Image (tube, helix red, strand yellow):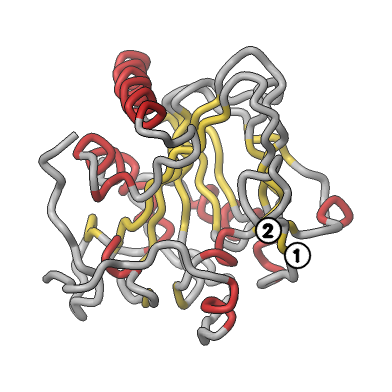
Amino acid sequence: MSTSSTPKFIPTTGELSSLKRDLRFHPAATSNPKTLSAEQISAFNRDGYLKGIRIFNREEIAAIARYFDDLLARTLAAGGDSYSISTAHLRHGRVYDLLTDPRIVACVADLLGEDVIAWGSHFFCKMPADGKRVSWHQDASYWPLTPSKAVTAWLAIDDATVENACMRFIPGSHRLGHLTYTLSEHDEANVLNQTVAGVEELSQPVDIELKAGEISLHSDLLLHGSEANQSDRRRCGLTLRYCPADVRASLGWNAKGVVVRGADQSGHWVNSPRPQTD
């Protein structure tokens, strides 16, 4: 299946607000998980996240880091920055391989079911002392998807610690539904353009420290963010996005989707092949 038009991957606030979307949390309903435990499924439904799941060993993640170093150097040379490598699986075969890695997909499938679409890949790389934070936000606010069932696997390419600005989550906030945000487009210190205010009043933030090669998993409605990296160490993570095949994408975003488990009987998702270039 192909599309004749160029997909639009950065929707405006107006475009998103005009869409009819189901922005409620849909709990994982897997009764017989194959990779995660029943306790982990319950914790995800309660807290909105899981952390510290080992995927790649030391040698594997070192090779991935070397690959990213080269990709980042090429991106910077072309005029991009350390946050601009997005939807990378449609251009880079190695990123496609990470997005479709069976070990990650197995974890996600225990949360989403047997028909799984992988549709997003975005490097969030905080360079040493770059001074940029990610304000509190919900991923679902940015995505023209419905219903709200997407899960992000955040792969630590570098060790992520409090010192180099690991992610922070607000446990249980995914069960509050879609929250009001303000636009912060002119705040150059904020990597994204939205901010949810008063978050700390909801619950105590949790620091999500990860070792390189580990992933965390979080709901698209979970409030999360990160502080500025003031350390002398880089903090790079690759966000890998997934949803069940019954989710519908507007504004051309179905062109991003790759079937990684089961089937997409409706043919809604384009399911492009692995890129041959890198």
Residue behind mark 2? 194
Residue behind mark 1? 182
Amino acid beneath label 1 = Thr
Secondary structure category for the residue under label 2: strand
Q: Is residue 39 above or below residue 215?
A: below
Q: Is residue 13 visible?
A: yes
Q: Is residue 118 above or below residue 100?
A: below
Pinpoint residue 64: horizontal percent, then vertical percent.
32, 24
Q: Residue at x 27, y 46 (%)?
A: 89
Residue 94 found in image quarter? top left
Q: Is residue 262 above or below residue 152?
A: below
Q: Is residue 35 above or below residue 138?
A: above
Secondary structure category for the residue under label 1: strand
Is disc 1 in contact with disc 2, using a CB cutoff of under 8 Å?
A: yes
**Relative to 14, is 106 on the left or the right?**
left
Pinpoint residue 221: horizontal percent, then vertical percent.
60, 63
Q: Residue furthest right?
A: 201
Local crowd size for mark 1, using a 10 Å CA cut-off: few (<14), some (14–19), many (≥20) = few
Q: Residue at x 37, y 26 (%)?
A: 77
23 or 53, nearer to the observer? 23
Local crowd size for mark 2, using a 10 Å CA cut-off: few (<14), some (14–19), many (≥20) = many
Residue 1 found in image quarter? bottom left
Amino acid beneath label 2 = Gln
Pinpoint residue 208: horizontal percent, then vertical percent.
64, 35
Q: Residue at x 23, y 55 (%)?
A: 260
**Relative to 37, is 142 on the left or the right?**
right
Gap in Å between the C-alphas at discs 1 and 2?
6 Å
